[in-house]
Image: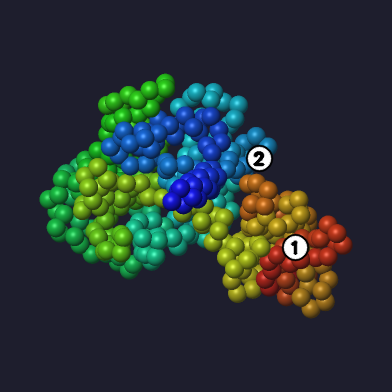
Amino acid sequence: MRTSWKYLLIALLILTSISVASAEAIGKPAFRRVWQRTDLPVQQGVAGYSWLWGPEPFTPVLGEALAESEGGRREVQYFDKSRMEINDPNADANAPWFVTNGLLVNELIQGKVQVGFNAFIPLGPANIPFAGDPDNTFPTYASLIRILNAPVGYQIGDHITSGFLPEGSNDYPQYANSPASEITQIQMGFGIPRAFWDYLNRSGTVYENGRYVNNQPLMDWLFVMGYPTTDPFWTRVKIGGVEKDVMFQAFERRILTYVPTNDPAFRVEMGNVGRHYYQWRYVDPFANGKPALITVPSRANSPQVTSPLLVQGFENGAAFEAAITVRLKNKASGATIAEVHTLVVRADAGKAGPFVATLNFTAPPTNTPATLQVLTNSPRDGAETILDSFDVIVQKAP
């Protein structure tokens, strides 16, 4: 019996060590300070609310592309609910907005990855469900494009009864008199229902200056959420395999959901936007081992291209020292029309990152079938590996 307990103890220690090793540390003191304020009380069981960020980050600190930041990269770290980021490492580290969380929902809906304050690279809208079980097929971030930045004109006192369907809408009259669905605030022309507005302005236990403090505002809602970008709607999704009514509303940074059948403290929650964004940006584009993806120009139906030709896309971290070549090649003769070498702005060693290149060439006398390629060369023997390619038509000279 003693031997059995001995082996059980060893097994438990091994499992514990595996669990600890699998969790990422919060990589910046400023990130830790922001996380601790609201999520340490949740972790320690002294708060009556759900996570604002998540139990721990699920990535190390990454250096994602941002043209205006130091070295063309900003430090970020991903949590379940969002991404913390530092755009200017030389700013006051104690300032309230030294750490921000990205406008991830905007990017997911519009399908564009931000690489500068006003610069984006298309990736395609995220067909990822934002509420309920992961196998839900609707609603997705991509589906929200039809209601994005299109307020219907709610007034204070109106109630949310409109439903959101894959095609069109329906009505949820059972919530016509629900206090939770009553519009109590208007921001940027969008109505915010009582359930969400109360959540954004609630108080609770926070961790400040090394101690727990009760009855404190949990958040600056604009810092955490950004402005609303859709009106609230009702929909129906599977949660734990059971279909339930859910009211949702998209904001620039996060999405809120309200499930009337949940326990009161957890009826309003934030979607796992950080997880979803990471999947969209780093996982889904490279499914089935795809090493790179050209997104500009559009690859549909052999597009016609002219000089200068802007080429943008994402590479999955395989190219040696992040060096790639972008080439335009005559399809019939194999001759190179234009070629340029560029670097992938990787978030970390072996991580995916965006690339941008411009090809300049002389227009041919006739429309010419060609192939646009992204490739890399072996550091050993110079052998080429095509990472992505598709056919285009080089437009003739006018």
Q: Residue 364: which disc?
A: none
Identity of the residue drawn at 85% across and 62% down: 382
* Residue 178 visible in this rendered orientation of the protein: yes
Sooner in the amino-acid sequence: mark 1 or mark 2: 2
Residue 335 spot, x, y in % from top left? 83, 71
Q: Position of residue 160 (x, y in %)?
A: 21, 52
Q: Is residue 180 left or right of residue 334?
A: left
Q: Name the residue under label 1.
A: 375
C-alpha distance separating marks 1 and 2: 23 Å
Tag 1's secondary structure?
strand
Residue 397 appears in which quarter of the rendering? bottom right
Q: Mark 2 points at which residue?
A: 72
Residue type, numbered disc 2: Gly
Identify the residue shown where x is 83% and y is 57%: 379
Instruction: Tell me the quarter of the picture where residue 67 sits.
Output: top right
> Would you place residue 318 above or below residue 373 in this image?
above
Q: How crowded is mark 1: few (under 14 residues within 10 Å), some or many (20 or more)?
A: many
